[in-house]
Amino acid sequence: MSLDLTSTALQIDSMAVELKQRNTDKVRRLQTALDAVGDFDVDAYQAKLEESRSTLLWNVPSFTGDPARSYPPAPIPDNFCVVAVDGSHIDIDRHLPARCYLINTGTVYLRYGSQPDAELSSQPRLYAEEDELVIKDDRAPYRQQNIDGSLLGAKRAVEELRALVHALHNTPKDIPTVGLVDGTLVMFGLQQYPDFVVRELVDNGFVGALEELRQMAAERPLAIGSYISLPRAGEVANALRLRACPFDVANCESNCGQIPARERACDKAVGGLMDREIFSDFLDKGHRSSVFISNSPVVSKNYQGHGIHFFYVNAGEEIGRVEVPSWVAENEASLELVHSLIIDQCRRGPGYPVALMEAHEQAVVTGPDRRYFVELVEQALYDQRLPIYSSEKNISKRQKWI
């Protein structure tokens, strides 16, 4: 037996006892947070945020309204469309004889009303050319970055948004339409990479697609958004931490740098909470929260004026997070369209937007798919009389030794 289940079970029991002890204190902090939301001075918060923006160690949003307010969904149109995209990928594997990766994008088009229709498709794309396996600096071609791991995840996000643009170009122009993607619209995690990588994926890729969508929305009833199921974000909770800070300016390093975690005043008050835990108390089924503005550095630095706004919604089975570009959030009709159609999609599905669920089914690459992909690669190399090799580690996984 590879895993000592007896020893593991004892450790799990110990973890459960510790979690129970922590939960007691969390209930208290959650009540403090709920009280703070119910008596929130938005103007005072915004003023403190501006004073503390350069010295905060955690990301906090800007507020556009009372965080305790709850907004019901608007009636859905008689005729409307929902387009959703999702993707998955097969990463470069150093154990295989060919360097390549694959991105599979699933697209779903659903039309409701007097002429209902549905189209489901997937588009696999293999990347194997030398120029496709790296990102090069157009200002210094000798600088380049391999596309793999988390960077491939960012590349996939760009391709998903481009697929959404392509799909929306082929939808009726006179029918209210919402385009949906799964996950965040903020390209986190790229700060560790050189500037030319961020420029290629964010400035030229993701933001370029956002701009094309904005132009399309200016000419037709179109809005886009992303849906995040069971979100772990804590930006609004961080705003409550800022509110609980006893200093006029929240200079985290100088004021509290020597204080252990969980002992700082803000941590004791409302630390360790997730936004969904807070809004589960305020939102009726189908309702959304006020809209908040993301202050993520990558958005302010690289999104070329495309701000990212977000709100929380009671989807029935969970509190979900919806992110939209600023040009959707600032247009009341577009914001209401995203809200009402996401709720409608969740009602039609198992508490999750049915279009995104189907897009995932189109995009998913299963374990057998991955094994067959490897076999196809090896067979293609064999047919071309190219050497087929693998690491001894990979070979050992395929064979029984003892």
Image (spheres, grey):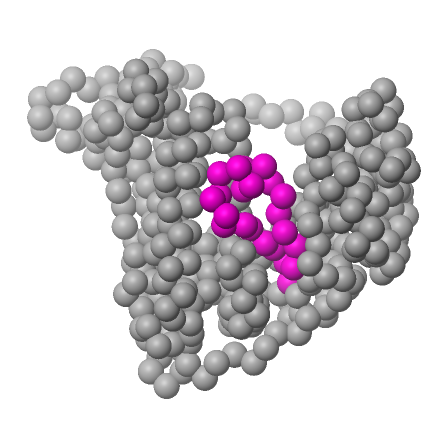
Res 369 → quadrant: top left
Res 379 → quadrant: top left
> x%, y% of residue 186?
53, 44
Q: Is residue 387 visible?
A: yes
Q: Which residues are magenta?
A: 291-314
> x%, y% of residue 255?
85, 26
Res 41 → quadrant: bottom right
Instruction: Look at the image and say whether residue 306 sits in the magenta stretch.
Output: yes
Residue farthest along the left direction in this orientation: 384
> x%, y% of residue 375?
24, 32
> x%, y% of residue 385?
9, 22
Q: Is residue 55 above or below residue 303?
A: above
Q: Residue at x 69, y 63 (%)?
A: 289
Q: Nearer the viewer, residue 95 or 121?
A: 121
Residue 283 located left or right of residue 349: right
Q: Nearer the viewer, residue 39 or 379?
A: 39
Q: Nearer the viewer, residue 216 or 67?
A: 216
- The quarter of the rendered structure image containing the N terminus is top right
Q: Residue at x 38, y 71 (%)?
A: 220
Residue 138 located left or right of residue 326: left
Q: Disc count in the image?
A: 0
Instruction: Look at the image and say whether residue 304 sits in the magenta stretch.
Output: yes
